Amino acid sequence: MIGLGRGIGGALLFALPMQMTMEMWELGFSMDRWRLVLLLVVALPLLVGIAHKVGFEETFDLKEDLRDAFIAYGLGILTSALVLLLFRLLQPAMPASEILGKIAIQAVPSSIGALLGRSQLESAHQDSGNDDASYGGELLLMAVGALFLNLNMAPTEEMILISYKMTDWHALAVVALSLVLMHGFVYAVSFKGGHEIEPGTPQWHAFIRFTLPGYVIALLISLYALWTFGRLDNVGATPAIMAMIVLAFPGAIGAAAARLIL
């Protein structure tokens, strides 16, 4: 029960900003239903990965990871429905498709928050989960962090507006700053959860092995998020790339933060 309580707390803490955002309400009934279903499907392996690292309780096999992932989905659906009802954003007169869409789109960030709640809200003396993340596991965590922050930003028109205001030089500067921040947060500024480069290991090793792949993941997640929310519909290649770079800036920070937090 304590784990479930933390899950509900995490779902509210991490997802409440999106539950109170107008663009997310509108997307609940306006976005393409196949894209919404795909988002729900894509989120599942990410939830399984988080559950393996910091589930509601220590897990030992894929079955238990799946159990925690589905529990997180359930908590995400429950908290999203309650918050939307509380703010009168769900009403009996609404079509069922609109009600389900509004809850479903909010359930993704809420379910991620439910699992993150165990990591962030647990007692200081408790074990924070499995610390033996593989290389693939590290990349998965970065994908989760990038997706979570992108879900906050991608639905807004500001991402497209900023991309139209930027020049090519601005875009290159954003890419460079994204890489510097990603690498610095994890390896240079001694945040809690940061990583140290082992003696004798070249400084560029971690950059090539983790930071660059992490940024590529942030770019791909950003492109996917923009497409999911219809921000790339009827948009040319160059504006799409610029918007991807803009959204990958918070995505890169989210990816780095996920490595620190988890």
Image: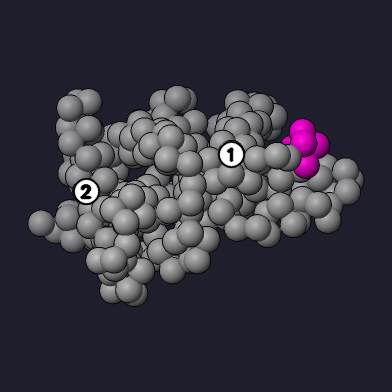
Q: Where is residue 214 in the image (x, y as percent from the top left)?
A: 58, 34
The answer to which of 241 and 195 lies nearer the viewer is 241
Span highlighted in magenta in the image: 236-241
Mark 1 residue element = helix
- Position of residue 38 relative to residue 96, above or below, is above
240 falls in the magenta region: yes
Q: Position of residue 240 (x, y in %)?
A: 72, 39
Q: Which residue is drawn at 58% across and 44% down?
A: 230
Does residue 37 appear in this view?
yes
The three-letter amino acid code for the residue at tag 1 is Trp
Badge 2: residue crowd in 10 Å (few <14, some 14–19, many ≥20): some
- Quickly name the residue at label 2: 74
Give the quadrant of residue 140: top left
Q: Where is residue 168 in the image (x, y as percent from the top left)?
A: 88, 43
Label disc, if present, on residue 97 of the rendered structure: none
The answer to which of 257 and 84 lies nearer the viewer is 84
Q: Do the residues labelled 1 and 2 touch (CB within 8 Å)?
A: no
Q: Residue furthest bottom?
A: 87
Does residue 107 appear in this view?
no
Give the mark nearest the N terminus, 1 or 2.
Answer: 2
Q: In which quarter of the image is the C terminus?
A: top left
Label disc, if present, on residue 227 of the rendered structure: 1
Q: Is residue 211 left or right of residue 112?
A: right
The answer to which of 107 and 67 lies nearer the viewer is 107
Viewer-nearest of discs 1 and 2: 1
Q: Is residue 243 left or right of residue 101?
A: right
Q: Quadrant of the N terminus?
A: bottom left
Q: Is residue 128 left or right of residue 133?
A: left
